[in-house]
Image (tube, rainbow, N blue to C red):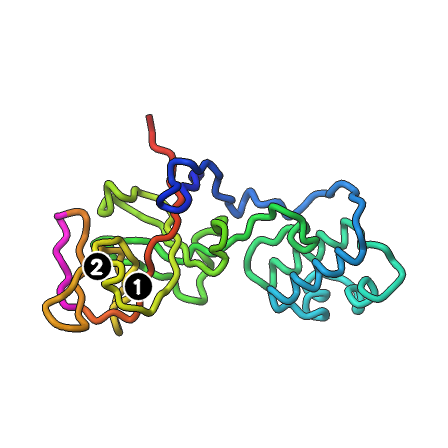
Amino acid sequence: MTAIICGQLSACQRRSRIIVRSENYPQGGTLPLMAYDKSAAVTALARFQRDTGLKDRPWEIAAGLGGGTLRKFRTGPNRSMSNETYEKLAGGAAKLLGRPVAAAEIRGEADVPILVPLRSFVGAGDEVIVLPADDAPIDWVQAPPGMRDAEATEVRGRSMNPAYHDHDILFHRRIETDPLIYRDEIVVAQVKGGKRYLKLVQPGTRKGRYDLVSINPAYERIEDQVLEWVGPIEWFYRRPRRQ
């Protein structure tokens, strides 16, 4: 599936980037030789390890590298690691992190896409089905700017037409606040001790209770729910429509 990034809702019509599919994400091949400052490369390596939590020895083992490879690079006389070493590190990081990793990400090069797992989809009745933690994600999708910590949910079916369509990808973050801040907005709503939905949120008949309403009138209102959190849709990727 290829989809267009529609961006923040207010900027949807101005965006034209593409989802990065895991099968198309570069992990192999030989990168061209590049001149770079070793101190910058060491800084980029340290930042990558800090952000991912990867430790030297487990990472070296996963990458098939000798012990001390990273330490020798940081403290030794070598100006750089080879492209082959970077590619092995990328492969090892991908195994440990469970997501695609490119050598360019380890190098700290600009414009490297950040991928987030797609682990949920909207099923019948606007219910959000979340994969078990042990299951592989449905896919990996490029995170919009500033949305590294977001969750991604895929729309399936037509229950959210015309706002969202089949296979659109929605990005949201969990916010524990008064849900009525997002009154009449489409949110991902987690019902206390129960299911998760993609609905409009409206006040219920009692304080602290909320109604969840579908755009599609074929689905009944879910009344007087206690919500653990809501996630307003901050960005979405839209699949191109057939002409």
What residue sits 18% from the left and 68% below the top?
Answer: 225
> 10 Å neighbourhood of mark 1: few (<14), some, or many (≥20)?
many
Q: Which of 68 and 146 is in front in this view?
A: 146
Q: Are marks 1 and 2 in contact (CB under 8 Å)?
A: yes
Does residue 82 appear to the left or right of 149 in the view shown? right
Q: Position of residue 185 (x, y in %)?
A: 25, 53
Q: Is residue 117 above or below residue 132?
A: above
Q: Mark 1 points at which residue?
A: 230
> 10 Å neighbourhood of mark 2: few (<14), some, or many (≥20)?
many
How far apart marks 1 and 2 lie (CA) works out to: 9 Å
Does residue 204 appear to the left or right of 124 in the view shown? left
**Which segment did they paint magenta?**
217-224
Amino acid under label 1? Val
What residue sits 18% from the left and 52% below the top?
Answer: 214
Does residue 19 appear to the left or right of 53 in the view shown? left
Q: Is residue 22 above or below residue 70?
A: above
Residue 34: which quarter of the image?
top right
Q: Nearer the viewer, residue 6 or 60?
A: 6
